[in-house]
């Protein structure tokens, strides 16, 4: 965050944080821990870090957790921490998708704020049940669609809202990767195994893992609501049970049209998230691999390069920038922005204050939209790409 915002937040005690999942061999758990500490708003004090008690305890020991707060299961952690005077105030859930609903429910019902990895759940029925639990809880629910934390994504959103692009007509978004080009899951690779297993991942493969990110980014920047889609999903790798490539046509309320491509079998692409938005007055383009820049082209004028914390950037970008222009901020900083937005909201609630209007983070409602997107893609593709309401 900006230096001014960081100083203001630093006067608050660190928020006591627990973690579910994210133990040994888990990529995203380490990312969440770094993001939580980057702006010095959280302190990890408890965990249930794996699906088996033995692995959970071993992982917690490796992280240096207090043995009395190193739990064998998330339910045990939720029950005991809720009773402690200095128990956790928030919990990060960084498990495979099928665990999200049950784990989040345990903490929300005890008034503990939940910061959950995406997608919201592995199916729409659980997503709707989780929304009910979240709505009835006094605690917050934050979904870590981390790409919404980039300063130039906030800049793009601000420009659309201000009418700089005019009425939106076309949205093009893509997220290609290449790491599942071969049957990596058959080697036992942990990250590939659960992502290609319907019982753990849900109905979507690439659509659930990265397609939800692309869809969420498009909705976040444009403010548009998806009305229907037509999807063509493939499992190109022989024996794979979930999609590894998807082409999706999008129809938004108000008449805008879009195309979304997500793929995990695209050699040459590591994490190629890219979005282009075109309106009656101009267009923008942002690429996650070069995130400190946003291209803006007013219709009939030369293309302009806007830079983070520099030329052309407005208050929305400046608010979530940490360092001067010319020094790159990237993936971990964007992830940290979501955690720091969560800290702003949690501290406001603790102090009996209203959450500021400029505090922005994905919610359970955004999560439901993501799961509905996946299930609509699967339903459409099974019917030869028929247009399907979302």
Image (cartoon, grey):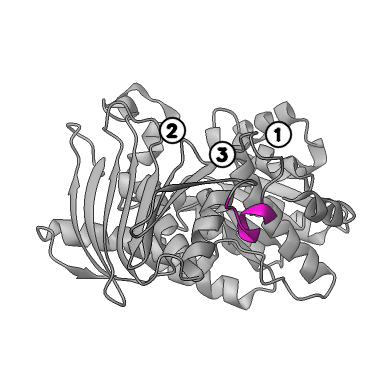
Instruction: Compare residues 111 and 381 and report the one nearer the observer.
Output: 381
Determine whether label 1 and label 3 are within 8 Å by CB: no
Where disc 1 sits, the SS reads helix
Quarter-wise, where is residue 206 in the image?
top left
- Residue 82 lies in the magenta stretch: no
Identify which residue is drawn at 54% across, 64% down.
Answer: 158
Residue named by callout 1: 60
**Span shown in magenta:** 312-320
**Height in image: 75 above or below 254?**
above
Residue furthest toward the left?
384
Q: Residue at x 32, y 25 (%)?
A: 184
Residue at the disc numbered 2: 191
- In this orientation, does residue 42 appear? yes
What is the distance, in whole Å, between disc 2 and disc 1 at their CAs?
Answer: 20 Å
**Residue 314 shown in magenta:** yes
Residue to which mark 3 is pinned: 331
Mark 3 residue crowding within 10 angstroms, few (<14) / some (14–19) / many (20+) = some
**Place of residue 208 in the rendered image (x, y in percent of width and height, measured from the top left):** 36, 50
Whether 86 is drawn above or below 390: the answer is: above
Q: Give the residue at x 88% y 59%.
A: 85
Labels 2 and 1: the sequence-earlier one: 1
Viewer-side label of 2, 1: 2
């Amino acid at each position: 965050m900006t230096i001014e915002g960081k100083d203001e937040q630093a006067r608050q005690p660190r928020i006591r944080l627990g973690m579910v999942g994210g133990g040994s061999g888990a990529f995203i758990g380490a990312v969440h821990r770094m993001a939580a500490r980057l702006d010095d708003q959280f302190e990890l004090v408890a965990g249930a870090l794996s699906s088996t008690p033995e692995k959970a305890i071993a992982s917690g020991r490796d992280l240096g957790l207090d043995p009395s707060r190193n739990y064998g299961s998330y339910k045990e952690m939720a029950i005991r921490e809720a009773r402690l005077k200095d128990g956790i105030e928030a919990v990060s859930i960084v498990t495979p998708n099928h665990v999200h609903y049950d784990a989040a429910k345990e903490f929300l019902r005890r008034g503990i704020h939940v910061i959950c990895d995406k997608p919201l759940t592995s199916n729409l029925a659980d997503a709707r049940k989780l929304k009910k639990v979240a709505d009835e809880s006094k605690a917050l629910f934050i979904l870590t669609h981390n790409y919404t934390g980039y300063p130039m994504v906030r800049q793009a959103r601000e420009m659309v809202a201000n009418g700089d692009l005019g009425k939106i007509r076309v949205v093009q978004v893509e997220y290609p990767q290449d790491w599942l080009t071969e049957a990596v899951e058959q080697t036992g690779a942990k990250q590939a195994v659960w992502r290609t297993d319907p019982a753990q991942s849900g109905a979507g493969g690439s659509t659930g893992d990265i397609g939800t990110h692309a869809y969420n980014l498009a909705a976040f920047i444009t403010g548009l609501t998806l009305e229907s889609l037509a999807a063509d999903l493939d499992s190109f790798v022989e024996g794979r049970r979930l999609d590894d490539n998807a082409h999706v046509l999008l129809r938004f309320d108000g008449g805008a049209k879009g195309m979304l491509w997500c793929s995990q079998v695209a050699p040459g692409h590591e994490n190629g998230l890219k979005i282009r938005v075109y309106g009656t007055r101009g267009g923008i383009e942002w690429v996650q691999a070069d995130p400190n820049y946003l291209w803006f082209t007013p219709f009939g004028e030369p293309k302009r390069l806007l830079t983070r914390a520099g030329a052309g950037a407005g208050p929305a970008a400046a608010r979530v920038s940490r360092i001067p222009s010319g020094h790159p901020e990237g993936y971990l900083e964007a992830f940290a922005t979501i955690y720091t937005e969560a800290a702003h909201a949690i501290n406001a609630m603790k102090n009996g204050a209203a959450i500021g209007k400029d505090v922005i983070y994905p919610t359970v409602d955004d999560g439901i939209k993501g799961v509905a997107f996946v299930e609509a893609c699967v339903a459409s593709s099974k019917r030869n790409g028929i247009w399907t309401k979302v």
